[in-house]
Image (cartoon, rainbow, N blue to C red):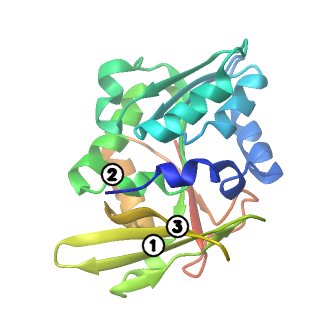
Amino acid sequence: MDAVKNLVEYYDELFPVSDAQRIFFESYISQFSAPAKFLSIGCGTGIFEHRLAKDAIDVTAIEAIRELLDSATRRYRNQLMSLRYFQMSTLEMTKFLGKKFYNIISCLNSRIAFIHKKEFLKKFFSDCKELLSENGIVILSLENFEKFRAEPKAILPARKSIRITYKSQITKNAQGTFLESRLENENKSLPVYERAPIYPLQKSEIAEFAKEAGFKKIEFFSNFEKNSFSENSDYLLAVIR
C-alpha cells in the first residue's frame, strides 16, 4: 500500500514554488482577461494554487489523494479568494468540470505519469481540449523519462530540503513500469510509493497525443527558465496550445 501520507509534512519544501515558476506562469496567465481561469490537476498540498488565488486568479484544483487534498483545504480555510478544491481523478474531469471554461490547465511534478494506461492518457489530452477555452493552454512538467527508456531500473533525480531527501526509482518488467520512492535523512527512512504503476510518458508521445486531441502547437523546454530541452535534460516541460 502506498504511504503517501508520509509525504504531506514535507511536500511544500520538496516541491517549492520558485521565482522562475511564478514568472513562467505569469507570462501565460497575462494573455487572458482577468480573472484568468486556472485548472490545476494533481495539486498536492495546494501551495502553488494558493499563491495563484492570492493574485486574483480563479483557481480550480483537483487531487485524487485524500491526504494531500486535506492539507490543501486546511491551507485554504478562512481565505477570501476564488479557490476551490475537489477530490477527483482525471477520468472524472469532463463529468464534473465546466467545458470550454479554463484558460490554463496545468499538471506538474510528473503527476501525469500516474495515469498509467495509454488509453487513459489519450483521454486526458482530449478531455483537456474539451475543458479549455478558446486559445487555452495546457502546461505539463515531468521527469525526462526518455533518459531511462532502455534501462530496466533507473534512479530519478532526488529532491532535497534542509530536513529530508526524497529518493525515487523506476523499474520495468513485463507487467509494466513502477515507481518506488522514500523519504530519508539520518534519522528516518519512510516509504511513499511502493510499486506504484506509472506510464513513463515520452516527448514524442506528448506530441502524438496532443495532435490527436486537436492541439496545434507544442513547445518543449527543460525548465521554467525556458532553456532548450535535450535528451540529457532531467526534466521536460511542455506548453500545448
Q: Residue at x 34, y 42 (%)?
A: 124
Cα gap from disc 3 to disc 2, whole angstroms: 14 Å
State which tag comes first along the sequence, 3 or 2.
Answer: 2
Q: List the residue tagged with mark 2.
A: 115
Q: Is residue 140 visible?
A: yes
Q: Position of residue 51 (x, y in %)?
A: 74, 32
Checking the image for residue 50, the label placed there is none
Residue type, numbered disc 2: Ile
Q: Are marks 2 and 1 in contact (CB under 8 Å)?
A: no
Cα gap from disc 1 to disc 3, whole angstroms: 5 Å
Residue type, numbered disc 3: Glu
Checking the image for residue 143, the label placed there is 3
Checking the image for residue 145, the label placed there is 1
Q: Does 15 sit above or below residue 227?
A: above
Q: Position of residue 100 (x, y in %)?
A: 44, 20
Circle 1 SS class: helix
Q: Are marks 1 and 3 in contact (CB under 8 Å)?
A: yes
Q: Residue at x 29, y 71 (%)?
A: 177
Q: Is residue 41 visible?
A: no
Q: Nearer the viewer, residue 182 or 32?
A: 182
Residue type, numbered disc 1: Phe
Q: Position of residue 190 (x, y in %)?
A: 51, 66
Image quadrant occupied by the N terminus: bottom left
Cα gap from disc 2 to disc 1, whole angstroms: 14 Å
